[in-house]
Image (cartoon, grey):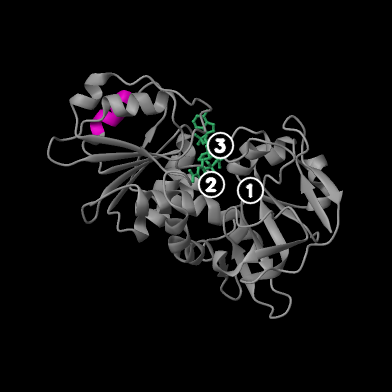
Amino acid sequence: MHYAQVQAFDQPPQYLEGPDLPAPADGQVRLKVLASAVHRLVQMRAKGQHFSARTAPLDPSSDGVGIDEATGQIYYIGAFAAATFAEYVNVDKNRLVPIPAGADPIAVAALTNPVSSSWMALSERVKDLPSKFSVLVVGVTGTSGRTAIPVARQFGAGKIIGAARNEKALQALVADGSIDKYIVLDDKLADATAALGHVDVILDYVYGNATATILTALQTGTDVETQYVNIGTIAQDESITLNAQTLRAKKLTLSGSAPGSYSLAAAVQQIPGIVALAATLPKPADVVPYPLSEVARVWDTDEARKKRLVLLPWGQ
Ligand SMILES: NC(=O)c1ccc[n+]([C@@H]2O[C@H](COP(=O)([O-])OP(=O)(O)OC[C@H]3O[C@@H](n4cnc5c(N)ncnc54)[C@H](OP(=O)(O)O)[C@@H]3O)[C@@H](O)[C@H]2O)c1
């Protein structure tokens, strides 16, 4: 069987050939892998920079889409349920979610992890949100930030404010009705944040200076909580300076959302809803599919780093 693995954390994954898989164990099924997306999480795992990836050799994949050749049913393969940089996987049946007929396996592979980021934050990491809550999505123009919009609407958001650096992209999101308002991550961020007034929840994909500025400037009331959830660090800055008075002067809770901050049982419970939503979304324009056999060549290209690489173990 062909598969791909990182042999050392300073090198791209290598395409390899090894023995076939053993027969599936009780409670498992054999799937032919159709697509495995290289999310930001997978990129971090491949570099040994994620808490779930500390030793090599390692298959850095997180999830994927595969077909049961006996029935023709296509499934989403849950996060860390199997090493999906491979032609075949044996997976526990309880980690599979059937994909609705007609859904694009590449789009579902590309979108389920991004959709899960805000879904798990809103289902597991915030409490007692008011009806028609307001949400500030920091990093709303990224793939995960964009999917946070339909997720927040599904969870009952009444007002969605987007934050990002690219004002044109923010204007487009307002123009097509995706978000209600935006603030720009620039040198006027503190004033723009203060002018927002209270927001019920902040979903943050960026972190770093932008987050410190937002938390400091936010004018939130003493009656209603603002619940901040860190989801990512696309600004590449894992630390912020937070004045103690910011914590004392506001009704603010701070948390984060990723596997580790919620249980596997919670993820298993939520994943059917996540996949159902992901299957309805259009494939993002920046998805770039490549055969898994080309992984070493395409891994470190500008295209793969900036766009959404999806690897296909059986080619195009
Ligand atoms: N915890 C979880 O479950 C989970 C799941 C998925 C993703 N994540 C994390 O969430 C983050 C975003 O993921 P994604 O899939 O949305 O990534 P993405 O699609 O690569 O995000 C790209 C966007 O990030 C913005 N950006 C890039 N560099 C930036 C910087 N230095 N400062 C501010 N904004 C910057 C850019 O928007 P503008 O130029 O318009 O500002 C760009 O469009 C990543 O850190 C990822 O690891 C976490």
Task: Report how far apart the C-alphas of labels 1 and 2 lie in the structure.
Answer: 9 Å
Q: Which percent across, then down, holds residue 115?
A: 49, 54
Q: Residues within 10 Å of mark 2 (few under 14, many from 20)?
A: many
Which sits in the foreground, 79 or 129?
Answer: 79
| Residue drawn where x is 68% and y is 36% of the image | 55
Q: Provide the residue span drawn in magenta.
A: 190-195
Which residue in the protein does label 3 denote? 51
Q: Contact (CB < 8 A) between labels 1 and 2?
A: yes
Mark 3 CB lies closer than 8 A to ligand 1: no
- Image height of 262 relative to 7, above or below: below
Task: Report how far apart the C-alphas of labels 1 and 3 lie in the structure.
Answer: 27 Å
Of tags 2 and 3, the one toward the viewer is: 3
Which residue in the protein does label 1 denote? 286
Mark 2 CB lies closer than 8 A to ligand 1: yes
Q: Considering only order in the chain, which callout, 2 or 1, is on the residue closer to the N terminus?
A: 2
- Image height of 135 relative to 217, above or below: below
Q: Which percent across, then down, holds residue 205?
A: 46, 38
Q: Is mark 1 on a helix, strand or loop?
A: loop
Would you say residue 91 sits in the magenta stretch?
no
Of tags 1 and 3, the one toward the viewer is: 3
Which sits in the foreground, 112 or 32?
Answer: 32
Q: Quadrant of the N terminus?
A: bottom right
Q: Quadrant of the C terminus?
A: bottom right
Classified by dominant secondary structure, the portion drawn in magenta counts as helix
Q: How crowded is mark 1: few (under 14 residues within 10 Å), some or many (20 or more)?
A: few
| Residue drawn where x is 34% and y is 24% of the image | 213
Q: Which amino acid does label 2 sit on?
A: Thr
Task: Report how far apart the C-alphas of labels 2 and 3 lie in the structure.
Answer: 22 Å
Q: Is mark 2 on a helix, strand or loop?
A: helix
Q: What residue type is labelled 1?
A: Asp
Which residue in the protein does label 2 denote? 143
Mark 1 CB lies closer than 8 A to ligand 1: yes
